[in-house]
């Protein structure tokens, strides 16, 4: 069991203080360093209402990311967040180009799996009331106040209602089922809601309770439980915990996405990029260019006026 989380039945969270403390959380890795640097620059320029920014990285990337630290920004080593029995190795199956995390207690995990575990685990490390999650390939283009994530003592839970009932979304449905399994929810209770996006908020006390509930149900460390299935989503786990076990207590739902994301396809030309930005919805304050698409970070900096 993980002693940082107290096992117990799901408990309805109390109201947030009138002005809760807020931290922004970013999980990253060395190939995304320059994108993360851009995030930090635009975040410092445009975002208000956050007391701190945590950047979560693998141990070998800590020194590189230390360049980004300030009095309000901290780089956190995953070794301070995750169990020591989870080890990272260069993967020979990828000719040592990728990393794999191995243990006797989980499936072999890739970097995107472990980034999700870090985002959950930061709740036991941070002290702020509300954690706002922002990917490292995001750039803020407009002013944004973190107060958008709470009202009347409740935190905003991103949820797109009913989308898993539509055609497609097969992988999302698997993530949702595995979230239910981790939380001990009866398999007959399925969910049709999607909780996945970037620039979303969680209550830290609710994450702590969620991990405690996972450990109570399974009698094992929550990392071991979640990592026993290679197809999981931290957003689905949190969303289903709040809606299925807490019946939404301490939260209000919002479906608007504050970040416009270019998820798939080819790198955008200059004109396509300008059109993409111009098409941002009124509530959208940031853009995300998925790093695997390969859009040159220098071009992004130039097109948003930072070079």
Image (cartoon, grey):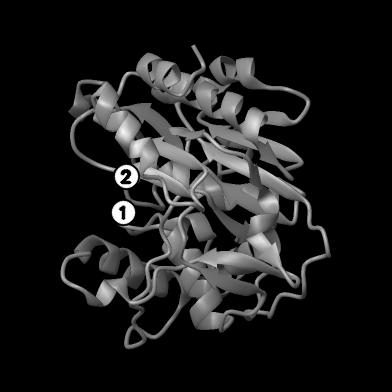
Relative to residue 17, is residue 263 depicted above or below?
A: above
What x and y, as percent, mark residue 305? 49, 19
The residue lying furthest to the left in this view is 167
Q: Quadrant of residue 59?
A: top right
Q: Quadrant of residue 114?
A: top left
Disc 2/disc 1 C-alpha distance (Å): 8 Å
Q: Is residue 155 visible?
A: yes
Q: Residue at x 46, y 66 (%)?
A: 255
Q: Are marks 2 and 1 in contact (CB under 8 Å)?
A: yes
Front residue of 106/146: it is: 146
Q: Nearer the viewer, mark 2 or mark 1?
A: 1
Relative to residue 174, is residue 108 depicted above or below?
A: above
The residue lying furthest to the right in this view is 18
Q: Residue at x 36, y 44 (%)?
A: 279
Front residue of 207/228: it is: 207
Left or right of 211, for residue 237: left
The residue lying furthest to the top in this view is 307
Q: Secondary structure at mark 2?
A: loop
Left or right of 239, for residue 270: left
Q: Residue at x 52, y 34 (%)?
A: 141
Q: Which residue is mark 2?
A: 108
Q: Which residue is mark 1?
A: 230
Q: Residues within 10 Å of mark 1 (few under 14, many from 20)?
A: some
Q: Residues within 10 Å of mark 2 (few under 14, many from 20)?
A: some
Relative to residue 30, is residue 163 depicted above or below?
A: below
If you read the primary sequence from the N terminus, does the residue marked by circle 2 or circle 1 appear first? 2
């Amino acid at each position: 069991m993980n002693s940082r989380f107290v096992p117990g039945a799901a408990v309805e969270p109390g109201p947030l203080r009138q002005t809760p403390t807020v931290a922004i959380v970013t999980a990253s890795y060395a190939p995304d360093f320059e994108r993360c640097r851009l995030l930090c620059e635009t975040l410092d320029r445009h975002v208000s209402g956050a007391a701190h920014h945590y950047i979560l990285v693998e141990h070998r990337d800590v020194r590189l990311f230390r360049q980004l630290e300030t009095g309000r920004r901290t780089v956190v080593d995953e070794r301070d967040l995750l169990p020591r029995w989870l080890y990272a190795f260069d993967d020979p199956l990828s000719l040592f180009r990728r990393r794999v995390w191995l243990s006797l207690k989980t499936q072999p995990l890739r970097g995107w799996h472990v980034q999700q575990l870090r985002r959950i685990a930061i709740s036991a490390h941070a002290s702020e009331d509300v954690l706002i999650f922002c990917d490292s390939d995001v750039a803020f283009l407009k002013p944004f106040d973190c107060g958008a994530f709470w009202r009347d003592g409740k935190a905003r839970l991103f949820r797109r209602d009913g989308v898993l009932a539509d055609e497609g979304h097969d992988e999302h449905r698997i993530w949702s089922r595995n979230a239910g399994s981790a939380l001990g929810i009866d398999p007959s209770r399925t969910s049709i809601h999607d909780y996945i996006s970037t620039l979303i908020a969680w209550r830290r006390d609710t994450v702590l309770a969620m991990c405690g509930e996972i450990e109570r149900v399974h009698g094992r460390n929550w990392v071991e439980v979640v990592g026993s299935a290679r197809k999981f989503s931290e957003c689905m786990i949190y969303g289903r915990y709040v809606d299925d076990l807490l019946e939404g207590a301490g939260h209000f739902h919002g479906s608007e996405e504050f970040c416009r994301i270019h998820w798939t396809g080819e790198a955008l030309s200059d004109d396509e990029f300008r059109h993409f930005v111009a098409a941002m919805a009124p509530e959208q304050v940031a853009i995300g260019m998925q790093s695997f698409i390969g859009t040159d970070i220098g071009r992004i900096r130039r097109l948003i006026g930072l070079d």
